[in-house]
Amino acid sequence: AAANAAGQVTGRLARKLTPVYDNLTNLCSHFHAVLDYPDEDIDPFREETIRTALEEGLAAMDLGHLLPSVFPEGYHFTSAQVHQLTAWRDLSVHYENDAGDLLRFSCSRYSEDTVFSTVVEKDEEEVEILTYSGTTCYFLSNGPYESVTWMEDELTECRISGHVTREELKAMVESMHT
């Protein structure tokens, strides 16, 4: 805890996350420029650019292995956010398909002295519990939405949720834990 406090005072984490935040901001700006000005001579927006930025964001949070390599067909990147709060840091990545359906991937890393509790809305469907490479994952439904949540370690909570099938979620999780 003392080392964590000293790091906060000296700005160690801010120096680490500022380039990530700037990179994701630039990524979103480029994405919107391509959409808003299709007739301009702007480099096309490429999937590998998104993946690189997200990999760098997760790596800065020491979670580089957590980006799914499998995504449901038709979904495209819409935004990513990095938040740094006193008790945790959070990376959220949003995808959307042509029908306007959303998919959200998030990873929250809590500080060692934080007591946290998460509530996930669900319907009356039973929770399905599966284990991938030693990680217990909880699959649940909430109306037309499916979610999976898991603790990557004692301080890192991950979740994927959206208007996708449970099988698509399972494929995404499996792609991260194999």
Image (cartoon, rainbow, N blue to C red):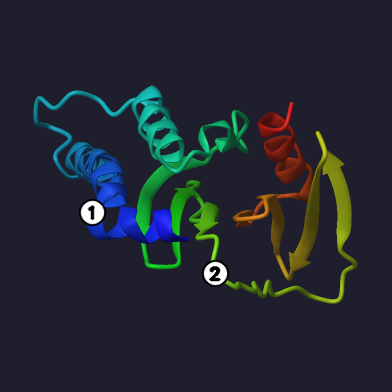
Looking at the rendered structure, the secondary structure element under dot 1 is: helix
The residue most toward the left is: 40
Residue at mark 1:
10
Q: Quadrant of residue 29?
A: top left
Seen from the viewer's position, the closer of residues 59 and 30 is 59
Image-based side of 99 in relation to 172, left or right: left
Residue at 69%, 75% (x, y): give it: 121
**Quadrant of the drawing holding the C terminus:** top right
Rendering coords of residue 66 (x, y %): 58, 37
Q: Amino acid at mark 2?
A: Thr
Q: Which mark is residue 114?
A: 2
Rendering coords of residue 103 (x, y %): 55, 52
Residue at 88%, 57% (x, y): give it: 128
Rendering coords of residue 36 (x, y %): 18, 45
Q: Amino acid at mark 1?
A: Thr
Tally the marks.
2
Rendered position, 178 above or below 93: above
Label whose residue precedes the other's in the sequence (2 or 1): 1
Nearest to viewer (mark 2 / mark 1): 1
Seen from the viewer's position, the closer of residues 36 and 85 is 85
Seen from the viewer's position, the closer of residues 160 and 101 is 160
Q: CA distance from mark 2 to mark 1?
A: 20 Å
Rendering coords of residue 5 (x, y %): 37, 61
Residue 101 visible (yes or no)? no
Instruction: Report if the CB atoms under discs 2 and 1 are less than 8 Å apart.
Output: no
